[in-house]
Structures are given as structure tokens and as C-alpha cells.
Image (cartoon, rainbow, N blue to C red):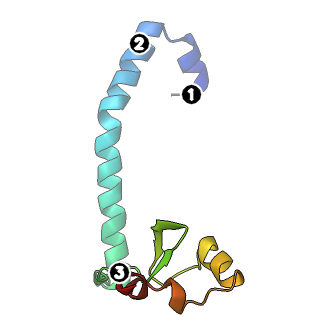
Amino acid sequence: MNERTLEVMPADTLWALREKIDRMLPAKLVAEKHELERRLAKLTGGHQKIRRPYPQVHPKYFNPENPSQTWAGRGLTPRWFSVQLEGGRSAEDLRIHKAIAA
């Protein structure tokens, strides 16, 4: 079927063709996905490394100006933490255990 055939086809026939495609396409995509996964498993030896779940990390630092902002000490340093350090506070001043004891 070429583009010219579609141009001369009546609208009812085109619509019926579209409905047929809409019914068939999801099944074809699922089948193709399974085939690709099978081929990938064959290439990797069927062993895909499963990541272990990380334990929950509790926050260690808080923003004294907005106590709802916390940081666990991992990843990028939050801006508020950097601002507090530049303002003369130490990281120990921002620790949560120290704030609770005070």
C-alpha cells in the first residue's frame, strides 16, 4: 500500500483501517518488547544485576531559618546549608541531634 492508494481511499475505509491498526498495534508492540528482552537476556547471559534497596537515610542537618528543610549529608550540598556556613555557623551547629538537645 503506497501513499497514493491512501489518498484515493474513501474516508470510511481509512477510518476502518485506522481502527484495525489501533487494535493490532498494542499487541505487536508487546510482542516486539518481549523479543527485545529475550535477545538482551541472551546477550547478557540472562543475569541482570538486581540492585539492593538502600536503607532509609535520616536527616542529619536542618536549616534553623526553616526547620522543615533538612539534609542527610549525601549528594549535593543544599544552598541553605552553604549560606549558613558562609554566615559563620559550623556544620556541627546545624546537626539535628544538637538542636534537639538544646
Disc number lying in front (2 or 3): 3
| Three-letter residue code for mark 1 | Asn
Q: Is residue 67 left or right of residue 37?
A: right
* Residue 63 position (above or below residue 98): above
Label 2 to label 1, Cα distance in Å? 15 Å
Instruction: Name the quadrant containing residue 56.
Output: bottom left
Viewer-nearest residue: 6 or 85 = 85
Name the element at disc 3. loop
Which quadrant does the C terminus fall into? bottom left
Label 2 to label 3, Cα distance in Å? 62 Å
The residue that mark 2 highlights is 13
* Residue 35 position (above or below residue 20): below
Label 3 to label 1, Cα distance in Å? 62 Å
Residue under the point 31% across and 35% down: 24
Name the element at disc 1. loop
Please rate how many residues cluster around mark 3, counting C-alpha atoms within 10 Å: few if below 14, some from 14 to 19, many from 20.
Answer: few
Q: How many marks?
A: 3
Viewer-nearest residue: 26 or 53 = 53
Pointer 2 or 1: first along the chain: 1
Pointer 2 or 3: first along the chain: 2
Labels 3 and 1 touching (C-beta < 8 A): no
Question: Residue 30, position in %: x, y?
Answer: 30, 51
Question: Residue 44, position in %: x, y?
Answer: 36, 83
Question: Residue 52, position in %: x, y?
Answer: 28, 84
The residue that mark 1 highlights is 2
